[in-house]
Image (tube, grey):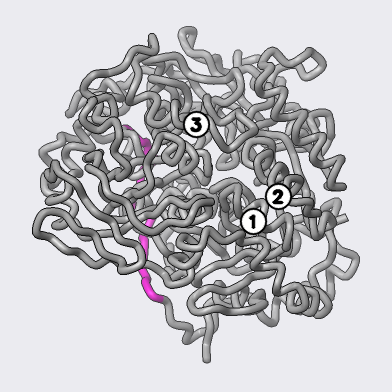
Amino acid sequence: MPKTLYEKIFDSHIIATRNQSHLLYVDRHFLHEVTSPQAFDGLRLNKRQVRRPDLTIATVDHNIPTTDRSLPMVDKVSSIQINTLENNCKYFGIKLFGMNSPDQGIVHVIGPQLGITLPGTTIVCGDSHTSTHGAFGTLAFGIGTSEVEHVLATQTIWMQKSKSFKITISGKQKPAITAKDIILFIIRSIGTSGGAGTVVEYSGDVVINFSMAQRMTMCNMSIEAGARAGIVAPDQKTFDYLRDKKYIPHNYDALIDYWKSYLYSDPNAKFDKKIDIEISNISPQVSWGTNPSMVSDINSKIPFPEQYSESDHNRLEVENALKYMGLKPGTPINEITIDRVFIGSCTNSRLEDLIEVSKIVKGRKVFPTVKAIIVPGSQLVKKQAETLGLHKIFKDANFEWRESGCSMCLGMNNDFLLPGERCASTSNRNFEGRQGVGGRTHLVSPIMAAAAALKGHLVDVRELM
Amino acid sequence: MKNFKFVRSIITPLDKINVDTDQIVPKQFLKLVTKTGFGKYLFYNWRFNLHGDKKPNFVLNKSLYRNSKILVSRDNFGCGSSREHAVWAIIDYGFEVVIATSFADIFYDNCFQNGLLPIQLNGEIINKLMKFESYVKVNLPQQIIEFGSERVKFVIDVEKKQNLMSGLDNIAFTMKYEDKISEYENISNVPSIL
């Protein structure tokens, strides 16, 4: 029977089945400091070991400082969490890319960049944006801390099969329209629960033409549409990207042959749900509300709550969102002034993102009232960017150039918004308080964030190109 | 984990859609390395103002609901981050059941790992529940909710139900599959990382 790519990977990892639940083997398990301490505690309490430390890696990313790392940490509570992870990794024999490692970075940036993320594998991590790794034809999804403990102990996880959802993206990708704009447009179209209960396969010419960085941005935000995972069939671009990476297996060529013969949805495979998205005429996208489906074109106006139906609570939600965001219906979006700019996060902090930003920023200055930071996704991204001289362009323009980490995407470290501050951000969530209590987030692409930093308000980046 | 069977309580109506895990337990409280003590941070930014004073209009701050064990909300409850802290906070606060029109996938799975019963019901029933001010009975063995003259059957996966009712240690259960896991590892062609 023809199968989807998701079904192929899922089925090939089934160890046992009970009723609707399948015991799946986990090929790679990624850990970070925030969602792992309670899992390790559980192991110790029950005198259990980590079954496969050789399939497990850890890094610190969520609450580490992005300022000078040679200085002692100011935040003692975060410091405890980081020390706890270091001790746990030492105790259980797990490879840690710690605060001073040249391979440290956001877990979803370093997995691919070190060649640990591989096509056809299953990857789990106690973080919802694990969906990022799906860009490599990987079945990758976020799990809770109890499941982290379960995977540490057994290298397996009980799962029910999700429904399959095919999103075909076609049209001509115009300049300034990035993968971020396209995924925001998709979430705007299908809603924050439009992908609930499904694993999304992204396909079509636009996705085939995407770089690996763009595929990662797209898969990363699958969770924002409620999907457990996003996936793209691997191709030559995937195999070439991974080839020279540090931890790539010795039998890489043999693996490629196998992947080529197997890792695609069969022509007649049945998807539970399908939609087509045409992107030829879309504009740069900006979020104006408090969830990632509250998104509009940059050159449009803040919507009126009356445009939304009353019955399903949407109108009320929009009213509340606009109140929180301090926005009046009918305001042109490109007239909204901003206080802060954040370029970073597992969605948009890769070298390619920074190169595109540098093209906009070069020779210009950040608007005087705006505080703008650029946080590379990993130490390697930072090093590569500096080799290209990008840091000079950023610093000359008055951007702060930071150390790698999750930073102001969730504001667990000292990078956060103050109450009422408004931020153009390349991250993935605009929930109330996400970037700081009372902070107001506008989700945009990296080049749109750069343009906003230069102009002091949200603006169509095409005016600067 | 205790054995879950019956709950009788008034409900706390949280009449919102898309309640995300950043609201359930804001990120500034994710730095604990334990599973307990999160209840005081539940819905923190909705319960307290910037000075730490209670906001009187928020439903959890109304004395009527102080001992409620059943939280009722709407579509897409628990969306966003995978943080299990959200479930720990709900339980630590004193809730044993969350009823909603739909749940986000990871949150839903996390509930069962901690003895919290998530129940999905249609919008019509939720509308009635939101307004119901007396005791609601939840019967997990029979999968029934009773309130007033209503008797509503709910759906739950048989495995998940058994796990809740027996308070089973999932890891010990999976370890019974040791032979099969080893067998799989022997035929798998996925290389070690290092």
User: Which residue is depicted at the point 21% across and 50% down?
Assistant: B136
Q: In the rendered image, is residue B61 in sight?
A: yes
**For residue B52, what is the image quadrant?**
top left
**Chain designation of label 2:** A
Say yes or no: labels 2 and 1 on the same chain.
yes
Q: CA distance from mark 2 to mark 1?
A: 6 Å
Residue carrying label 3 = B38
Left/right of residue A270 with respect to residue B121 in the rendered view: right
Residue carrying label 1 = A124
Secondary structure at badge 1 equals strand
User: Which residue is depicted at the point 37% across and 54% down?
Assistant: B118
Q: Which of A299 and B46 lies nearest the eye of the viewer?
A: B46
A30 in relation to A405, above or below: below
Q: Amino acid at mark 2?
A: Phe
Q: Which of B188 and A289 lies nearest the eye of the viewer?
A: B188
Label 2 or label 1, whichever comes before in sequence order: 2
Left/right of residue A448 with respect to residue A365 in the rendered view: left
**Mark linked to residue A30:** 2
Say yes or no: labels 3 and 2 on the same chain.
no
A438 in relation to B27, above or below: above
Number of other residues with Cα within 10 Å of mark 3, as a class: few under 14, some 14 to 19, many 20 or more: many
Q: Position of residue A136 (x, y in %)?
A: 65, 61
Query: Which residues are drawn in magenta?
Result: A272-288
Q: Which of B149 and A382 lies nearest the eye of the viewer?
A: B149
**Chain designation of label 3:** B
Q: Position of residue A211 (x, y in %)?
A: 61, 54
User: Which residue is depicted at the point 77% across and 28% down?
Assistant: A83
**For residue B24, what is the image quadrant?**
top left
Left/right of residue A122 with respect to residue A52 in the rendered view: left
Q: Amino acid at mark 3?
A: Phe
